[in-house]
Amino acid sequence: MGKRLLCLMVNGRPREDAVADHVLLLDYLREDLGLTGTKRGCDGGECGACTVLVDGELQLACITLAARCADRRVETIEGLAEAGRMSRLQSAFHEKLGTQCGFCTPGMIMAAEALLRRNGRPSEAEIRAALSGNLCRCTGYVKIIESVQAAAQASPESAANGCKCGGLR
């Protein structure tokens, strides 16, 4: 079993780690880097709980070898926070009650983030299509869709503020 030096950017920070050739991106993120927001769900690329962005594109971390991410940019749910505050999408999920139990939420948010980067004003059908690879067992997806719509409608000024409580948390 070989190891290689893996050089990549994770959440905007350069990383250089010795990683076994067989290590999955999910295990590298969770076990080596302590980024536990990316969830282990089905282990077969079917539920979307492990969704991350690799060079801005959706990637299922449970079926991706960490070595395939060499010299690439990986973004996890932890990387979306801005200056220690939730991103507009994270805030919208919180405010619109799009989280339910929260297990699928990181994957849902990452899929929605990829969509909003491509299309800042998606239709409901486009949101549903973008989230079609992410399963939630708690809800009928209504609050999740509403959360993405709210984030799309949020102005950059309100997103930077992060909350409506005057900065108190």
Image (cartoon, rainbow, N blue to C red):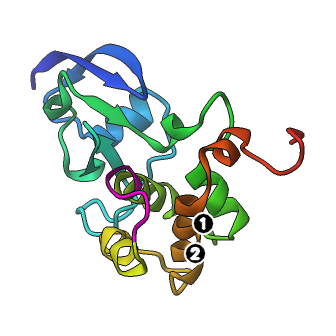
Q: Residue at x 51, y 46 (%)?
A: 37
Location of residue 84 (image quadrant): top right
Is residue 121 found inside the magenta-colored segment of the image?
yes
The x and y percentages for residue 52 are 35, 47
Q: Residue at x 16, y 29 (%)?
A: 67
Residue 5 numbered tag: none
Type of residue at label 2?
Glu
- Residue 97 lies left or right of residue 147; in this view the side is right
- Residue 9 lies left or right of residue 136; in this view the side is left
User: Front-most of 64 and 159?
Assistant: 159
Circle 2 packing at 10 Å, graded few (<14), some (14-19), many (20+), is: some
Is residue 91 found inside the magenta-colored segment of the image?
no
In this view of the protein, can residue 40 be seen by the observer? no
Q: Which residue is mark 2?
A: 146
The x and y percentages for residue 167 are 85, 38
Residue numbers of the magenta segment:
116-122
Q: Is 17 rendered above or below residue 136?
A: above
Location of residue 76 (image quadrant): top left
Q: Residue at x 32, y 74 (%)?
A: 132
Q: Which residue is mark 1?
A: 150
The x and y percentages for residue 25 are 28, 39
Separation (CA) of disc 2 from disc 1: 6 Å
The x and y percentages for residue 120 are 42, 57
